[in-house]
Image (cartoon, coloured by chain):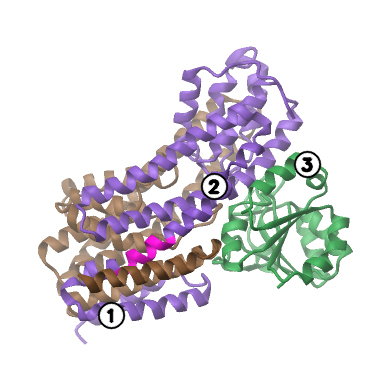
């Protein structure tokens, strides 16, 4: 991909990476949104939403509770959606599994980059503890604006680096894929649906009867397919 | 615990606080977590203290508000409203500090249950169901974003208002039925829709290879059972990454 | 089932406890052990708001908790006992030898504390208190959420501090 093609994708990754935690947390960084937007940018929103739906299933697994570490889906979905849109347009058999694998890898790297950013924010805050203890408005503004800017840069750089580092290998694998598109997608879907199903099963434990409702919903969904 | 409201909150100040709340986690770190963010969001209100932004009261209050704090980011609005009110009402500093500490846990717990474990998964599966029903990409995206942000922005606005109106008596507001019982109802709705969405997703992707749908569903149930049994010790996304890497190796490398 | 987790967390009742641990354990009750909270109605009211309606929360002083432990151990529901600092947990252990394991879930930064894990900062006095627990046969590990890898006290204290 040329720089002219990469830059808009990196910019989108920057904005959506920022949304994950720092600003405005409106969930434009959720895979179903981020991947669709990246797909549209790469020429196919329809491809983007397909990859986004699968990544959304994986994202359901991780609840951002407390201060725990979790994968970062904003930039990951931009990478996955952009890659899949380009590869699907080329008609390559391995397009979907390879794009999703690249996105999953980016999500884990993104989680690690957020951990690093938080450490950097901590170092900056510690250096200004005396000013904060004195009620310095400029120290507060400095920390907030530096943190927001750093997160924006983090998302952009991560997207850019992931595209530069992973896209050539991903495109090679997508093109040379010999396992068959349908069978590969079946394996991918089994893993994605299993992940979301297991996450739901744990989550629905919190409400009496919810697991039965989940099973009932699954029966209704299966019946709908049979009737089609 | 009760205090009379001495200073009204001007509209522009309230709007500034609400806008800043969207960036409350802007400097999140492992040392003081949301602390600086709470100071950043209460700061417009603290300028109303006697002496204004150059006064001693302002600096002392801001110093209190930037200390360690942790809560759910959306419900941080409750803390921002209540703490601003307590400062402007002139509550004793030591009482404000204890109140601030006591707010952390409940606002984190209620927010995590209501939003991360409730509203977000529900909106996510609504988006997935919309997708499986064949909606256009833009429609899918807008349904998810519109639904989610009605709850998201509503919660932030409600939080700031209720925090400001109730001040240090805000615990009674957290007893709101929507916060106490909402997560259970939201979880049940998410459960039904997730159940419907998963088979429909299989159908949407494997429509042209129908015989694979049943096999894929069985494989998914077996893997899901394994993941549940492992109780979070292995994440599905990591398992998938390893599985897909192996599949890529098998599929691409000429053996 | 009884108490499955004795946790030190300065946030006390919050999302990691109620959602993170609560969902994987099927949590039935939380025992919050803190002398100041046990004496403060309005703080109890706030903390009560943090748990689902179907979950019980008990507020006790250290002395009262030591007495109530037998009842909590006999409870059929899974429970978590929480203290907000190391000193409170150590006082409980001294009164109640039945406590055999302690989880460090969140001890955050303040002046004088050094970084051990991203969610555990300790002073030298706190390190000594944790060592004392270990010498009394209590297994001390750090783990913020169930999916995280538990870190033993030896490994925790062997990590280089960041001042």
Quarter occupied by the N terminus of chain C: bottom right
> Depth check: C142 or C72 in front?
C72
Secondary structure of residue under mark 3: helix
**Residue B3 in view, yes or no:** yes
Q: Tell me, yes or no, whether the two marked residues, 1 and 2, touch with CB atoms within 8 Å.
A: no
Dot label at residue A74: none
Query: Badge 3 is on which residue?
Result: C41
Query: Badge 1 is on which residue?
Result: B214
Q: Colour of chain A?
A: brown
Helix, strand or loop for the magenta stretch, by majority: helix
Q: Is C59 rendered above or below residue A139?
A: below
Instruction: Give me the chain letter of mark 3.
Output: C
Please name the residue shown 68% across and 41% down the image.
B101
Q: Colour of chain B?
A: purple
Q: Chain C is drawn in which colour?
A: green
Residue A7 image position (x, y, % from top left): 22, 45
Q: Which residues lie in the magenta part?
A: B191-199
Query: Badge 2 is on which residue?
Result: B111
Residue, far left: A90
- CA–CA distance in space, label 2 to label 3: 22 Å
Q: Which of marks 2 and 3 is in front?
A: 3
Instruction: Give me the chain letter of mark 1.
Output: B
Residue C7 image position (x, y, % from top left): 70, 60
- CA–CA distance in space, label 1 to label 2: 38 Å
């Amino acid at each position: 991909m040329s720089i002219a093609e990469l830059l808009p994708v990196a910019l989108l990754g920057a904005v959506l990476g920022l949304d994950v935690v720092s600003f405005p947390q409106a969930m434009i960084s959720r895979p179903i949104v981020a991947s669709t937007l990246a797909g549209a940018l790469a020429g196919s929103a329809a491809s983007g939403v397909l990859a986004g739906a699968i990544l959304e299933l994986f994202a359901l697994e991780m609840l951002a509770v407390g201060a725990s570490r979790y994968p970062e889906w904003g930039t990951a979905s931009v990478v996955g959606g952009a890659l899949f849109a380009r590869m699907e347009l080329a008609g390559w058999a391995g397009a979907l599994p390879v794009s999703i694998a690249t996105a999953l890898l980016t999500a884990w790297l993104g989680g690690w980059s957020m951990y690093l950013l938080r450490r950097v924010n901590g170092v900056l805050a510690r250096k200004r503890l005396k000013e904060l203890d004195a009620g310095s408005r400029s120290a507060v503004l400095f920390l907030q604006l530096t943190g927001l800017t750093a997160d924006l840069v983090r998302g952009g750089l991560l997207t850019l680096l992931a595209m530069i580092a992973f896209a050539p290998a991903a495109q090679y694998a997508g093109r040379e894929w010999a396992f068959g598109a349908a069978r590969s997608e079946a394996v991918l879907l089994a893993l994605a649906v299993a992940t979301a199903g297991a996450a739901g099963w744990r989550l629905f434990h919190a409400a009496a009867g919810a697991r039965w409702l989940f099973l009932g919903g699954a029966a209704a969904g299966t019946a709908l397919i049979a009737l089609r | 615990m009760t205090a009379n409201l001495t200073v009204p909150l001007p509209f522009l100040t309230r709007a500034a606080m609400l806008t800043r709340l969207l960036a409350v986690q802007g400097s999140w770190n492992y040392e003081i977590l949301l602390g600086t963010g709470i100071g950043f969001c209460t700061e417009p209100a603290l300028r109303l203290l006697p002496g204004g932004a150059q006064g001693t009261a302002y600096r002392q209050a801001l110093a209190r508000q930037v200390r360690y704090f942790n809560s759910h980011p959306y419900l941080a609005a409750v803390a921002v409203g209540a703490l601003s009110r307590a400062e402007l009402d002139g509550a004793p500093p030591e009482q404000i500090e204890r109140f601030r500490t006591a707010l952390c846990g409940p606002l984190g717990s209620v927010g995590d249950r209501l939003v991360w474990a409730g509203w977000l998964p529900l909106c996510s599966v609504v988006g997935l169901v919309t997708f499986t029903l064949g909606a256009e990409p833009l429609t899918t995206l807008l349904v998810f974003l519109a639904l989610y942000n009605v709850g998201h922005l509503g919660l932030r606005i409600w939080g700031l208002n209720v925090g400001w109106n109730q001040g240090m008596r805000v615990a009674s507001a957290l007893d709101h039925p929507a916060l106490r019982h909402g997560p259970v109802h939201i979880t049940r709705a998410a459960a039904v829709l997730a159940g419907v969405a998963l088979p429909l997703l299989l159908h949407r992707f494997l429509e042209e290879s129908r015989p694979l749908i049943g096999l894929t569903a069985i494989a998914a149930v077996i893997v899901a059972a394994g993941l549940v049994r492992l109780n979070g010790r292995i994440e599905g996304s990591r398992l998938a990454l390893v599985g897909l890497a192996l599949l890529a190796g098998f599929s691409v490398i000429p053996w | 089932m009884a108490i499955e987790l004795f946790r030190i967390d300065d946030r006390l009742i919050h999302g990691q406890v109620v959602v993170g641990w609560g969902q994987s354990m099927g949590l039935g009750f939380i025992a919050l052990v803190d002398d100041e909270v046990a004496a403060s109605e309005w703080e109890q009211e706030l903390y009560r708001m943090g748990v689902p309606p179907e979950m019980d929360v008990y507020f006790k002083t250290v002395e009262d908790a030591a007495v109530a432990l037998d009842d909590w151990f006999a409870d059929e529901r899974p429970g978590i006992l929480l203290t907000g600092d190391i000193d409170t947990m150590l006082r409980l252990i001294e009164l109640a030898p039945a406590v055999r394991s302690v989880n460090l879930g969140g001890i955050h930064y303040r002046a004088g504390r050094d970084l051990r894990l991203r969610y555990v900062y300790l002073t030298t006095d706190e390190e000594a208190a944790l060592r004392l627990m270990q010498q009394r046969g209590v297994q001390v590990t750090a783990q913020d959420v169930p999916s995280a890898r538990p870190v033993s006290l030896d490994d925790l204290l062997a990590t280089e501090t960041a001042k």
